[in-house]
């Protein structure tokens, strides 16, 4: 046997260690290479998901342009397929992802990966379920051969409810996943995708809620017909919710079919004076000699749910049958509707009614027949029933209807406050509130708020000739004590020679019967968020000869007792003679909460200006004086920076939301 010498004994373990080191290095290289290949494949799959999601997001930016449900289904299915491939590749790493937020640049993406995957999976599942439910309905709407009737559309919507309920379940899980994502930790590319997805999520949430709620509103939920009180408002005699209630109607609908529709005027002979009517608001008593509140004045309150409840209460004096809600609209609603429907043949109208001539026709139709005694059966508001009947016949027959155009017209009318709705169904009211369509007075929880309402108390239709301009200046030079100044200008384009006779004025020969050429009497109300202080104002004295009660009204601002959460109102009476203009000013100390500080050290001022229903588009100028040395970072509306003052010029066609972000040294 050979003896092993000492040098040989040393060499063998050394060689073994060297071999083991090389073997370990080789295995490490193999593992790293495998991980690299796996990581590269995962990255590639992730990019496929990113590209397909981006393409789908671009498609969904304009839902109204989607005409082919099958192509949209194919796009969502592609996202789902790419997502499944990516999830399979990434599965081995997902358990570790929440611990890898420390990785430079993409650590936040990796850390949030499980929630991002959950969001995308749930959202695609919800989308496919919703598309499966809605495809028959969309196919009917997009059909070129013939248009479905409202009853047929309602039936399809009712049939889709089981799938829509499943879609809602998946969507709520998607929202839960979205709430877990730390957006600020994501890379810029993913952060942009998620933040731009949020408005689409809100739209989808509203769409699913609307699809679940509409069958009930249309009497197709198995609970029998629905009955609604209709308030026909004339904005030529402006009231807080849109206009003087000239006529009321009773609409009964079941399964999308109108079972009955009846209208009646609300003149003095409408009321049952044996009933104990409630006292009228003190302004109506003092300025219009109206001791009690009756149906035609029930929309005194700017908060529409409040006015709607009063209308129901007073309508029940004559018609005690139960109601399911209130729908109010003005003349401009008909203009918007006819712009989508086209010319309308109406019994009694000498020409087809269009969006261009319908208001002039309604104004003229209230006058008695010229140069002859009025027929015994003539009623000055009968044309309203004729127009409503013609509109409903046109919409119900379903022939050649552009339902997308009609839907867009309804949305526009809701956004511009020419159509107002109040339902007893809490789900329906929640849906309306989400879009501001409930027309409740609602201030911002962390910002500034403003709403102005005119109430014509002049027994006339002069609002047709009155222009209103609004200027709102905000002083943020002292962030702990912000202030604002509101200026409201009324210009009356009526004849300057018309005397300001509040009651009993008789026009001379050749003057139009429709009473527009008058002085303008208005009770102006300004609503602000609670916590403000009225510092100063410029109200106007009303001479005794200009007011029905023949008592001088001193220049005063009334602090209103109208209980509304988070809102305080102020009111003042004004009279604007024909051919003149009048400016009314208010100065407020604002609560410091109108400006909030964000996590990065910047400040944001937010303002909501709520539009009065029944108005068109009052010009609105907003000036925001920033603190000394402040740097403007961004604003959500087009604006001009003039030194340290931000100037925004817009209009109140809809509610206006302003957000200004800035930094101070």
Image (cartoon, rainbow, N blue to C red):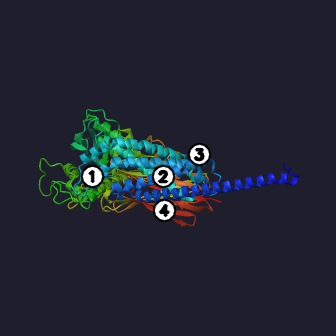
Q: In the visual, does 446 lie left or right of 103?
A: left
Q: Is label 1 in a helix, a strand or a loop?
A: helix
Q: Is label 2 in a helix, a strand or a loop?
A: helix
Q: Say which of marks 4 and 1 sits in front.
A: 1
Distance between mark 3 and mark 2 Cα atoms: 17 Å
Q: In the visual, does 5 lie left or right of 596?
A: right
Q: Is label 4 in a helix, a strand or a loop?
A: strand
Which label number is shown at residue 140?
Answer: 1
Distance between mark 4 and mark 2 Cα atoms: 44 Å
Whether 183 is drawn above or below 319: the answer is below
Sequence-earlier tag: 4 or 2: 2
- Which residue lies at the image location 18% right of the left edge and 55% below the top edge? 346
The x, y position of residue 313, in whole percent, is 32, 36
The x, y position of residue 514, in whole percent, is 24, 56
Sequence-earlier tag: 3 or 2: 2
User: Which residue bears the numbered disc 4?
Assistant: 648
User: Which residue bears the numbered disc 2?
Assistant: 83
Can residue 377 be seen at all in this image of the molecule? yes
Q: Dots 3 and 2: beta carbons under 8 Å?
A: no
Distance between mark 4 and mark 3 Cα atoms: 50 Å
Sequence-earlier tag: 3 or 1: 3
Sequence-earlier tag: 4 or 3: 3
The x, y position of residue 122, in whole percent, is 46, 46
Q: Say which of marks 4 and 3 sits in front.
A: 3
């Amino acid at each position: 046997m050979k003896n092993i010498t000492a040098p040989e004994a040393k060499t063998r373990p050394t060689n073994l260690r060297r071999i083991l080191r090389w073997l370990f290095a080789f295995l490490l290289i193999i593992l790293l290479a495998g991980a690299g290949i796996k990581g590269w494949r995962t990255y590639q799959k992730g990019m496929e998901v990113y590209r397909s999601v981006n393409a789908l997001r671009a498609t969904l930016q304009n839902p109204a342009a989607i005409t082919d449900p099958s192509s949209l289904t194919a796009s969502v299915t592609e996202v789902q397929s790419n997502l499944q491939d990516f999830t399979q590749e990434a599965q081995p790493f997902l358990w570790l992802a929440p611990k890898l937020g420390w990785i430079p640049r993409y650590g936040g993406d990796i850390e949030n990966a499980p929630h991002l995957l959950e969001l995308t999976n749930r959202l695609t599942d919800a989308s496919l379920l919703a598309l499966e439910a809605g495809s028959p309905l969309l196919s009917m709407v997009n059909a070129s051969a013939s248009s479905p009737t409202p009853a047929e559309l309602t039936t399809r919507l009712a049939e889709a409810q089981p799938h829509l309920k499943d879609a809602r379940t998946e969507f709520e899980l998607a929202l839960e996943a979205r709430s877990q994502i730390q957006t600020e930790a994501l890379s810029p590319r993913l952060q942009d995708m998620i933040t731009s997805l949020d408005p689409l999520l809100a739209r989808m949430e509203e769409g699913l809620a609307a699809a679940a709620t509409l069958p009930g509103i249309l009497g197709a939920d198995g609970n029998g017909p629905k009955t609604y009180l209709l308030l026909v408002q004339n904005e030529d005699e402006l009231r807080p919710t849109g206009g003087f209630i000239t006529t009321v109607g009773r609409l009964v609908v079941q399964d999308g079919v109108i079972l009955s529709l009846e209208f009646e005027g609300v003149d003095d002979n409408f009321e049952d004076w044996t009933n104990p009517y409630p006292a009228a608001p003190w302004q109506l008593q003092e300025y219009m000699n109206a001791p009690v509140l009756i149906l035609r004045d029930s929309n005194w309150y700017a908060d529409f749910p409040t006015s709607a409840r009063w209308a129901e209460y007073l309508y029940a004096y004559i018609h005690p049958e139960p109601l399911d809600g209130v729908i109010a609209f003005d003349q401009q609603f008909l203009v918007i509707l006819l712009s989508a429907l086209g010319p309308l043949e109406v019994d009694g109208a000498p020409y087809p009614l269009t969006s261009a001539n319908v208001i002039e026709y309604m104004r003229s139709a209230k006058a008695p027949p010229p140069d002859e005694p009025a027929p015994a059966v003539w009623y000055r508001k009968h044309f309203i029933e004729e127009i409503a009947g013609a509109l409903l016949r046109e919409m119900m027959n379903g022939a050649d209807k552009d339902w997308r155009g009609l839907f867009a017209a309804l949305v526009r009318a809701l956004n511009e406050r020419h159509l107002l709705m109040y339902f007893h169904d809490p789900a329906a009211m929640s849906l309306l509130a989400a879009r501001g369509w409930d027309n409740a007075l609602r201030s911002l929880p962390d910002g500034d708020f403003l709403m102005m309402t005119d109430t014509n108390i002049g027994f006339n239709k002069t609002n047709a000739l009155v222009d209103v301009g609004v200027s709102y200046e905000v002083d943020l030079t002292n962030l702990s004590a912000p202030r604002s100044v509101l200026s409201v200008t009324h210009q009356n384009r009526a004849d300057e020679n018309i005397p300001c006779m509040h009651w009993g004025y008789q026009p001379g020969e050749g003057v139009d019967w429709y009473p527009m050429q008058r002085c303008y009497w208005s009770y102006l109300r300004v609503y602000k968020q609670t916590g403000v202080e009225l510092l100063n104002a410029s109200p106007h004295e009303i001479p005794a000869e200009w007011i029905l009660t023949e008592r001088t009204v001193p220049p005063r601002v009334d602090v209103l007792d109208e209980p509304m959460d988070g809102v305080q109102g102020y009111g003042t009476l004004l009279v604007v003679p024909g051919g003149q203009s009048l400016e009314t000013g208010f100065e407020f100390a604002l609560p410091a909460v109108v400006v909030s500080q964000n996590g990065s050290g910047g400040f944001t001022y937010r303002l909501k200006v709520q539009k009065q229903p029944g108005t068109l588009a009052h010009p609105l100028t907003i000036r925001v004086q920033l603190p000394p040395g402040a740097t403007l970072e961004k604003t959500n509306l087009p604006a001009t920076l003039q030194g340290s003052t931000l100037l925004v010029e817009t209009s109140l066609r809809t509610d206006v939301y302003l957000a200004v972000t800035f930094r101070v040294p």
